[in-house]
Image (cartoon, rainbow, N blue to C red):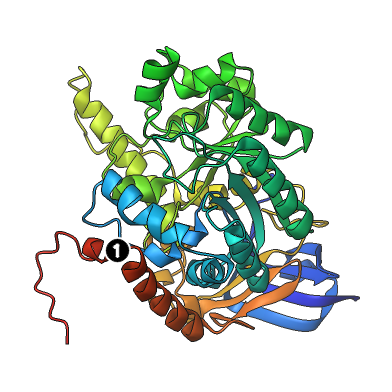
């Protein structure tokens, strides 16, 4: 027998090239890396520690490809507000008031949401720079959690899209990105530069930021099309086409681009994205919550575009639960397909014999190896294969009624919104245990909640945003 540090047993969903799933399998971990995967009957390893067994599931760590962690202080406040009310009424003011310490407190609850449910890698887009070290607070919280992070520092300069304090001189923004990169990059964290969308800075600045990512071999993370692109592209730049068409025209659309949301495209843009090798961060939970019935991932997947699934910020991704987003991916697509059918000239009716788009297996694939590919990390993570880092989730389904009986194991995981937190027996990043039996091994979630509650109370009064709390609620709220 070969010795290894940890031997995990259970139903192993490997996400390898053949999508091999071992109903009775094992994963051997040694030195932080996977050294063996296969059927239990063929296991040649003896672990210094053994975990799992009958009734357990072993999957790769989940990958969240889009988020805004600093929004923890405004979690859920989007409900009952318009886009402009939340953006300028409390989003910018409350996150803008977060210095390094406050950003740490604000980011910690959504970070714990992620890691306690099996997310081992997250992307983050940060554009709160009134306090230049606000981003440091988020990165410190990520570091303390043990997760991996691809952090994008977003530079804004357009006066119509960003208030005073959020706008930066380009040289200052890039210099700060260099500082953050020098101070925070390591084996688990990478730092890049970007901007929110193509109309949040001038075309020349947009191209210069993109060139920085090329020179530094980093991803260029952009919201496209962003809310104001359609109007501003036409009014200010005389561009009648789509956001991706503009990026391609400027020579920017390429393999280092990852675009978030990417809905309401111009005809042919999905094929253009595929031809250029760009990646897409789908955000179905946010699209569904906001009632955007045009959500369409099929156009990307059919065109062979690399896609992952992200959550957006806690202001609209309320529970900050990637499992919810996996279910939303399928539901939003199917509702979108039905909407497009009804809006077309076709008189085709649903007969019950059609196969609905997608599957639970596809959703889980996009949240693991798909997300890893979208973030250019699939050489290290995303699947359970020999040689890869041991980013692993062990689920104990023995008390999970929503996962029983097990014939439809993956559909039950996806449509049942995943395992409950206390059924997450272990979460590992490069072989290091971060979570055991639903609790982080070193972070106190009760303390995180207390500090988060207190921070929000302070910020609501400090920036005069209390009027947005329970805005338009039909309930009678009695204080005291």
Q: On the rendered structure, is 47 left or right of 264? A: right
How far across and down, in percent of the image, does residue 265 sit? 41, 25
Which residue occupies the extreme bottom position in the image? 480
- Viewer-side residue, 10 vs 189: 189
On the question of residue 125 being in view, the answer is: yes
Secondary structure at numbered mark 1: loop
Query: The C terminus lies in which quarter of the figure?
Result: bottom left
Q: Is residue 394 depicted above or below 127 in this figure?
A: below
Check the image and report above or below for 366 versus 256.
below
Q: Residue at x 39, y 78 (%)?
A: 453
The percent position of residue 451, horizontal first and vertical second, equals 46, 80
Residue shown at the point (25%, 34%) measured from the top left: 338
Residue at the far right in the pictured view? 2
Q: Nearer the viewer, residue 364 or 228?
A: 228
Q: Nearer the viewer, residue 147 or 365?
A: 147
The residue identified by callout 1 is: 464
Residue 155 place in picture, x, y as percent = 57, 41
Percent position of residue 90, x then y: 34, 57
In this rendering, the answer to whether 267 lies above or below 375 is above
Residue beneath the point at 64% across and 62% down? 136
Tell how many labels.
Answer: 1
In this view of the protein, can residue 411 be seen by the observer?
no
Residue toward you, 34 or 305: 305
Residue 140: image quadrant is bottom right
- In which quadrant is the N terminus drawn? bottom right
Count residues near mark 1 (Cα–Cα under 10 Å), then give few for <14, some for 14-19, many for 20+.
few
Report the side of 378 relative to 470 (left or right): right
**Taking 354 as reference, is 256 left or right?**
right
260 lies left or right of 327: right
């Amino acid at each position: 027998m070969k010795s290894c540090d940890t031997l995990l047993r259970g139903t192993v969903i490997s996400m390898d090239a053949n999508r091999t799933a071992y109903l009775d399998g094992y994963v051997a971990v040694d030195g932080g890396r996977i050294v063996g995967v296969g059927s239990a009957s063929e296991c040649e390893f003896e672990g210094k520690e053994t975990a799992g067994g009958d009734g357990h599931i072993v999957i790769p760590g989940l990958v969240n490809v889009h988020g805004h962690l600093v929004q923890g202080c405004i979690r859920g406040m989007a409900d009952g507000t318009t886009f402009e009310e939340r953006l300028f009424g409390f989003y910018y003011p409350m996150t803008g008031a977060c210095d390094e310490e406050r950003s740490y407190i604000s980011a910690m609850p959504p970070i714990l949401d992620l890691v306690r449910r099996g997310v081992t890698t997250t992307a983050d887009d940060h554009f709160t720079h009134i306090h230049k070290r606000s981003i440091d607070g988020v990165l410190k919280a990520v570091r303390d959690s043990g997760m991996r992070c691809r952090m994008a520092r977003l530079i804004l300069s357009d006066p119509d899209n960003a208030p005073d304090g959020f706008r930066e001189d380009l040289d200052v923004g890039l210099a700060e990105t260099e500082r953050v990169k020098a101070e925070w990059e390591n084996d688990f964290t990478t730092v890049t530069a970007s901007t929110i969308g193509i109309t949040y800075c001038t075309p020349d600045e947009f191209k210069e930021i993109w060139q920085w990512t090329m020179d530094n071999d980093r991803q260029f993370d952009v919201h496209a099309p962003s809310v104001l692109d359609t109007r501003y592209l036409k009014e200010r730049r005389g561009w009648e086409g789509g956001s991706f068409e503009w990026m391609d025209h400027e020579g920017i659309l390429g393999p280092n681009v990852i675009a978030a949301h990417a809905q309401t495209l111009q005809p042919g843009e999905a094929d253009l994205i595929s031809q250029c090798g760009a990646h897409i961060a789908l955000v179905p939970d946010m699209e569904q919550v906001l009632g955007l019935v045009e959500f369409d991932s099929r156009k990307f997947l059919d065109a062979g575009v690399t896609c992952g699934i992200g959550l957006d910020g806690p202001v609209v991704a309320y529970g900050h639960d990637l499992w919810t987003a996996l279910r939303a991916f399928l539901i939003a697509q199917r509702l979108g397909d039905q909407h497009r059918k009804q809006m077309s000239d076709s008189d085709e009716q649903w007969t019950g014999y059609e196969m609905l788009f997608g599957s639970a297996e596809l959703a889980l694939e996009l949240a693991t190896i798909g997300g890893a590919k979208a973030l250019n990390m699939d050489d290290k993570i995303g699947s359970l294969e020999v040689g890869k880092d041991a980013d692993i989730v062990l689920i104990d389904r023995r008390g999970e009624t929503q996962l029983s009986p097990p014939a439809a194991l993956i559909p039950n995981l996806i449509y049942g919104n995943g395992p409950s937190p206390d059924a997450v027996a272990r979460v590992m990043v490069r072989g290091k245990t971060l979570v055991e039996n639903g609790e982080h091994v070193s972070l106190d979630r009760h303390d995180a909640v207390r500090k988060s509650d207190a921070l929000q109370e302070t910020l609501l009064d400090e920036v005069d945003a209390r009027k947005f709390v329970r805005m338009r609620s039909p309930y009678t709220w009695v204080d005291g």
